[in-house]
Amino acid sequence: MAQLKADNRRGSDHIGQFNFKVEIDGIVYGAFKNVEGLDAETEIVEYQDGDDIVLRKRPGRTKYSNVVLKRGYVSSEDLWKWRETVIKGKVERKSGSVILCNDNGTEVMRYNFFEAWPCKWKGMQLDGKGTDAAVEEIELAVERLERIQGGG
C-alpha cells in the first residue's frame, strides 16, 4: 500500500488547481480566485524553395499571453494604484509569480512572469439579487514567462 505524504498526497496524485498564491515584486497575494493566461505561443514561419515540394516550417517569435488575475474585493488598493500609474502615463514594470502549492501550502511549482504592467482593470459586477462575492480583475501585459518545478 502506498504511503501518504505529509500533505495527504501520494506521489502519483495530481495537484489541485485551487491551492495557489500570486506574488508581485515580493508581495504575496493569497486572495485570488482565478488566474488565466499562463501560456506562450511561437509563430510559425513557412517558406518553400522553388523546386521543393515540401512546405518548410521554422520557429519565429514567441509571444506571451496577458495574465489575468481575478479576486474578491479586498480593501487593499496597491494593485489599483499600480494601474493608476499607467493611466497617468508612467509604466512601472514588475516581476511576479503564480505559485502552485500542495495541501500544506508548500510550493510545488511556479510560473514567473517578467516586465509586467497592468494594461486593463475590470471592476466588479453588482447584482441586488446576487449572492456571489464582488470580484475585480487586473490584466497584466507580460513580456516573458518561465515555468520552474519546485519541491513537492
Image (cartoon, helix red, strand yellow):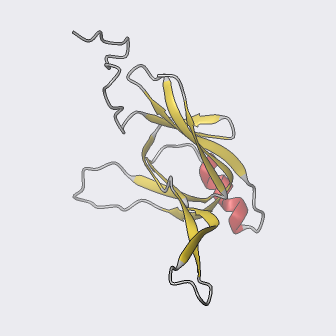
Number of numbered markers: 0
Residue drawn at (36%, 12%) of the image: 5
Q: Position of residue 37 (x, y in %)?
A: 49, 56
The residue lying toward the viewer, choosing from 86 and 148, is: 148
Would residue 80 appear left or right of 14 to someone viewing this image?
A: right
Q: Position of residue 39 (x, y in %)?
A: 51, 56
- The image shows residue 26, relative to residue 10, as above or below, that is below
The residue lying toward the viewer, choosing from 99 and 61, is: 61
The residue lying toward the viewer, choosing from 8 and 96, is: 8
Q: Position of residue 25 (x, y in %)?
A: 69, 40
The residue lying toward the viewer, choosing from 145 and 33, is: 145
- What residue occupies the far front of the structure in this picture? 51
Residue drawn at (36%, 32%) of the image: 15
- The image shows residue 78, relative to residue 68, as above or below, that is above
- What residue occupies the far bottom of the structure in this picture? 50
For the N terminus, give its image quadrant: top left
- The image shows residue 3, relative to residue 79, as above or below, that is above
Residue drawn at (59%, 88%) of the image: 51
Q: Position of residue 56 (x, y in %)?
A: 56, 75
Residue drawn at (51%, 26%) of the image: 107
Which image quadrant is residue 116 in?
bottom right
- The image shows residue 87, relative to residue 75, as above or below, that is below
Would residue 87 appear left or right of 10 to someone viewing this image?
A: right
Would residue 71 appear left or right of 49 to someone viewing this image?
A: left
